[in-house]
Image (cartoon, rainbow, N blue to C red):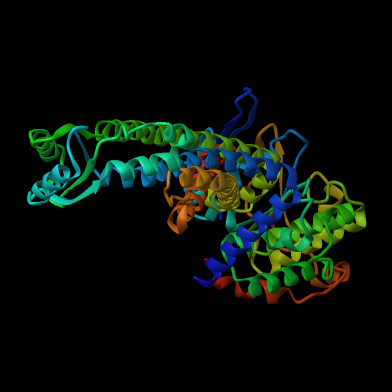
Amino acid sequence: MKQWLERHVQTMVGSLGRLWQKPFSTLLTVLVIGIALALPACLHVLVQNVRAASGGWSGALDVSVYMKQSASLADAKSVADRIRKRRDVSDVSLVTADKALEEFKKNSGFGAALDALEENPLPHALIVRPAGTFRDSAHVATLTEELKQLPGVDVVQLDTEWVSRFNAILDVVRRVVLLAAGLFALGILVIVGNTIRLDIENRRDEIEVTKLVGGSDAFVRRPFLYNGVWYGLGGGAVAWLIVMIVILVLSDPVQRIAGLYGSGFSLHGLGVQGSLALILGGILLGWLGSFIAATRELRGIEPK
Amino acid sequence: MIRFDNVWKRYPNGREALCDFTLGIERSEMVFLTGHSGAGKSTILKLISLIERPTRGTLIVNGHNTATLPRKKIPPFRRDIGIVFQDHKLLMDRPVYDNVGLPLVIAGLPEKEVTKRVRAALDQVGLLGRERNRPIELSTGEQQRVGIARAIVGKPSLLIADEPTGNLDPDLAVEIMNIFKRFNEVGVTVLVATHDIHLIERYGVRRVVIEGGRVASGADAPPPATLAPASLASASPAPVSLPSIVAERGDQP
């Protein structure tokens, strides 16, 4: 067992040493693998982030109830009290017309123009939050219908349609990411396989001699498998670095956009799990690519 | 040890290298294989080392039928045969130590044991201390001796050599033949293909002459040893402790 381990460590280091001796071609291979891994990884991070950002919306299915212009503040308050008594409602907040106008002036940048208005064009509004167990679309739809029947209510608005559309689009994008990852994985197998094939071609004499003195197929294949593992590990590390750089570059502008929308959202990276998956995925693909190529190629090399 | 029975070997290009070839070599025997180039000497060695398989007939080597031995069993089969090539087939970019130690590394021996045995084998061929040299820095004779060290380091029960003295001056050739002879004396079966008739006349060992893919003479039992051990000892340059590396052959897997 100890000898076996010793030999493996020796082969592993030896393989690394050989790759080190031709740094340029090794670097090229590692870069190509890294970029091929980084593309789907970046897309994945993007989808994760969009999901995280939109997760806040789908949870907060607030219903906006706009009172008629003619309704007084007292009317609005009494309607709010009636709604508050419903068991499918967890909270009702009243946004008075004055307050709404004030916020609009502050946020819209039309402050001066709005000052010119003689009277407040905005109605009183109620923000109704459905209770936890009544947030599915059927219950919310019933709630909306019933709220419309209340006296003094003008419009009831529910903006959930676009959230579910958005989620459907996101599902498609996720599939696209999966497909892209699959294609890129195939590409990596081909790249590693071809590189290993060339490595084997360059060491043909050595392989013949090794087989002549009794080296088995598994023995001559081992250093090439380690080559594949090194390529994969290097590629995974490069991909990780690329994803990190992309996040670093984008995080400031994204934060600014989030700030403009009054959200505390910030970009998430790969996380420990994602990073490990990326590196391990690289190693696995490198190993598999070299395994396929070496097994195929080495059978054909026999001493003459 | 080696038994050819009516073996035919035809190469894909149609050349018939062996025709109805029959030859037996006993365990611990030493045999010289001679004949003109193209007579079939190399084919015989290739068949024994399973680089080629017989087209017809049977060849038993060390108890294995080479016609039916599965591909997977070839590596362990070869580990029990030491092969010396005319062009020595060394890895030119690796130090002598790596070259000689290769069969042991393949066999999975621990590093300490490899070092010990490589040194012993290099001592046998008079190259102790050259472990770190690359073959390219050595003379042709020295390279050939590295090849021999690699062939014997695994303590094989059979040693075969194809024109091992082909490129060497007579003194070196004698030296190399003496190495083979010393191995035979401790029980290793040795088969040497050579066309250097003058050289092999010094040794009173069985000589098989090949002509046109058949045995022309020497097919029968070996003659008794005629060479006096004293004259052999005088010819060998460095009387080294051969048993130290061959004696433990019992532990061969």
In this picture, residue B17 sits left or right of residue A184:
right
Which residue: 37% across, 47% down? A52
Check the picture and name the quadrant holding the C terminus of chain A.
top right
Q: Position of residue A111 (x, y in %)?
A: 46, 37
Image quadrant in which you'd find residue B249: bottom right
Front residue of A107/A244: it is A107
Image quadrant in which you'd find residue B243: bottom right
Q: Where is residue B104 in the image (x, y as percent from the top left)?
A: 63, 63
Front residue of B185/A253: it is A253
Front residue of A224/B133: it is A224
Which residue: 59% across, 64% down? A9
All told, the count of numbered labels is 0
In this picture, residue B207 sits left or right of residue A173:
right
Q: Is residue B252 above or below residue A142?
A: below
Which residue: 34% across, 31% down? A169
Q: Where is residue B65 in the image (x, y as percent from the top left)?
A: 48, 47
Q: In this view, does A240 lie above or below A125?
A: below
In this picture, residue A52 sits left or right of residue B124:
left
